[in-house]
Image (spheres, coloured by chain):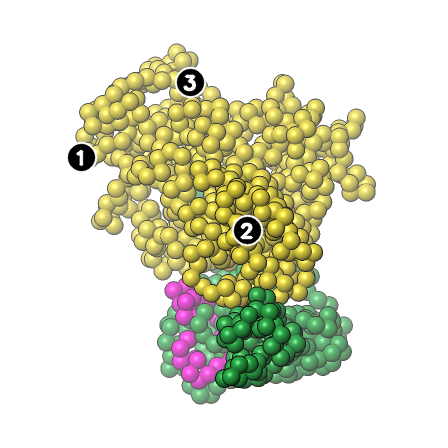
Amino acid sequence: MSTILEADTLLAVDVGTVNTRASLFDVVDGRYRMVATGRASSTAGPPLFDVREGIQVALDEVSEITGRPFFDESEALVMPTTASGAGVDAFVSTASAGPHVRTVLVGLMPGVSIESARRLASSTYLDVVDEIGLMDRRREEAQIDVMLATKPDLILMVGGTDGGATASVIRQIETVSLATSLLPAAQRPALVFAGNTSLGAAVMERFQDRSAVALVPNIRPDLEQEELGPARLKLAEIVNELRSQRIAGFDDLNGWSGGHAMLTAEAFNRVVRYLSQVYDPDKGVLGIDVGAAHVTVAAAFDGKLNSKLHSDLGLGISLPGLLRYASVSDISRWLPTDVAEAEVRDYIFNKAIYPSTIPAELSDLHIEYALLRELIRAAISRSRGEWVEGASSELMPPLEPIIASGGAIARAPRPGYAALALLDAVQPRGITTLVLDPYNLIPAVGAAASLLPMITVQVLESGSFVSLGTVVSPVGRGRAGRPVLRIRIEPESGGEPIEGIVRYGQLVLLPLRQGEHARMTLRPEKGFDVGFGGRGKAGALRVAGGALGVIIDARGRPIELSKDPERRRELNQKWLYDIGAMLQG
Amino acid sequence: MTRVQRERKLEGPGVLTVRVKEKVQSTDVIAEVQPQPQHHFLDLASALGVSDAEAARLLRVDLGSNVEAGQVLAGPTGIARRTVRAPANGKVLSLSRGRVLFEAREGARAVHAGVPGEVTASDGASSIVISAVGALVQGAWGNGRRGWGVLRDVGESRSARLEPHELDMILRGAVVLVGVVDNPKSLHLATEIPVRGLVCGSMASELIPTALHMPYPILLTEGFGSTSMNSPTYDLLSTHAGREASLEAPLLEPYETQQPEILVPLPATQDLRSPERIVQLEPGVRVRALRAPHVGAVGSLLHLMPGVESFPSGILARSAMVELEGIGSVPVPLSNLEVIA
């Protein structure tokens, strides 16, 4: 999708597992703005298996708000906008709903081609059900049985650098060919070969006319180089095709999008990569999207993106997967009140059954946010090993900004809930900014970026994204109550400067409203580093305000929670009050 | 009472044994399915001590034809009259470079109808649809099994816990109806009797690993914890105690068509329709609350509330005013309501 359009209005639809959202963007004062958004329950799953119902309800909401009809009498999308103001100039769609593509990976070396294939698979909606490699100790016939028993939708074949191994790759291709020949034609999986480019003809020959094989450029052209882009595009096509086969309405979405319906994670990644090119090159950009069925963690450092989609984590049907990475007591440690572990466990499994339900009681909200913390922690921990920066450090690399989206985060009753959950889960260091995407606009602006390049930056700079505030997290250890840093904030608006000392263990909010800027001077004590070049180094910078102002998190890195359950709950409660998530009295 | 369609799909190669318009009972065999076959490479050239080409010439069976265990596949050859025999019942699928790919097949497994009704559709090869009439209840969770048996109300209350001492031989072959299960011993004892199924309001989630290993279907109508079975479901099922009930308790899988269900087959007395797939939330609709503070409570929707409502959690949500039985009129987030017929 490379054509740049002249368009004033853009309609974007994102079909999630639980929610379907529609957003209308228009040019206001020469800049793109989100003017209305609608939300409905997704209808991709049972009983309808048809995304159109959910889309229609979400679009009806947008129509009701704006008075703009989108469809004509024949129920066709009106595009471009008519003189009477009906329809839109451009349409983009993204989707994360739909079954995952059951995939068998076939490759050579575990640390080379298979590793790259795993990275490729984990960046999109594939569910790897088995791996077959050169070091596989199973006999060839057992490998055939695996390919038959797992009923894959896709076999992804990799291996051999360009000009490298041929015989071992061909041997594996022959095993795949034999296995797929044993399946009835209607049950044969899609086949993608992303290995040694010189073997393309030999691969085609092995499958003859029996099965179509998509040849894509080698994901590992040499030992040092990894090239996932072209293969990722092909996999996106396969994911979309599979969804269209199983769920009605995706073809319509694709048609309205000019054949370029995108995967939500792909659009999300595009925005994170873009931001890393425009923000501070010395820091990375971190994007976290917590959905009902997946958690996406995208980290980009100077344009280099690493993204992982965790399909065994999510705040809905995938929630029980969290128990593989965190115990119930890991989750309970974030609770401000005493809740039986059995209750937390029941909550997890009930949320998986009823993913669209919301916490109406305060105690349920606390459990939901404790789960959110551990989901993000688990997802980041499983992603960090492959980041360009800070992969091996216990501390997070410097990040600016941290962007969070997803239903639970967007629903936070007060900004403090979302901020505290992110601080506890991510534990950023130094100076960063927390940004929320309450209307789930990231997929929309990501999908629209190549059509309307200005929309990304203009919408991101608009008030549609909520900056929670600038966060200062000194790194160091100390006794509770010991001074950590002196701070001075001088608002550019000319108001009274704010000065003070922050002590170890404190979580402090200093007022600076959204849209306001100030000069912030930080003088950390010896032994504490705020990112000005080392421990005890002072500095000053221009900061922006946010919903919570400036947040000083002096709880240390990593945060060490008290081992005494009562003391721990008291502190959790205190931090909720300190950050304005709960109101005193 | 309603009419339901139950699809039976073969999970592997097999044959259907019933035809469209045929009437079936729960116990009737409707298909025979082969378990997933195992494959073996048999190296004829090495075993016979000959070249690849000679091995091909010595093959004694046609590719694709069925053979029995012990049947000679290749040979004899040489002074020792060496042969290669079939390791199991199965077939030789291919021959390449002096070795054959052998597919071993075990005995076919019977697939039962699981519900009395009439076969209304079939693709003639791997799937049929059985149309059945009865009282239908949709559940929340299942342990991945299917079964049928006579429904027995053990605790005689929608909140009764299933205690191990209540499981005696009188429940042999029964589908047990109970409020809550929180004791793993009860699940194990039910296997020994054996019961044919368990329908409960809720179950402690720590019993999930045990429940997944039970040979009989377990179906939860509410979810996990200690929530009683909702009163309309309990009233309906307990009224039909003594009748046969059919349980479909599939595992929770996204994008699967089959949901957990209990069907009590009843004679068709009137013109019946399949249940509506979409029911609009409007005044008078019967609903059930899915979350605290009124989890499991049922009632009638009074009206949709304008705008959004604030709840004790601080969350703002579109809501409905609902008259819940025994509780009164309360606002409930729309997301936390489920329509019940």
Which lettered chain is shown in yellow? Answer: A
Judge from the rendering whether residue A381 lies leftward or rightward of residue B322; answer left or right. Answer: left
**Where is A167 relative to A507, above or below?**
below
Q: Which residue is mark 1?
A: A479
What color is chain B drawn in?
green
Closer to the camera in the image, B302 or A311:
A311
Tell me which residue sits at (41%, 40%) in the image. A386
Q: Which residue is mark 3?
A: A517
Q: Which mark is residue A433?
A: none
Q: Amino acid at mark 2?
A: Met
Tell me which residue sits at (52%, 52%) in the image. A167
Quote the CA–CA distance across marks 1 and 2: 55 Å
Tell me which residue sits at (39%, 25%) in the image. A282
Q: Are marks 3 and 2 in contact (CB under 8 Å)?
A: no
Q: Amino acid at mark 1?
A: Arg
Closer to the camera in the image, A363 or A255:
A255
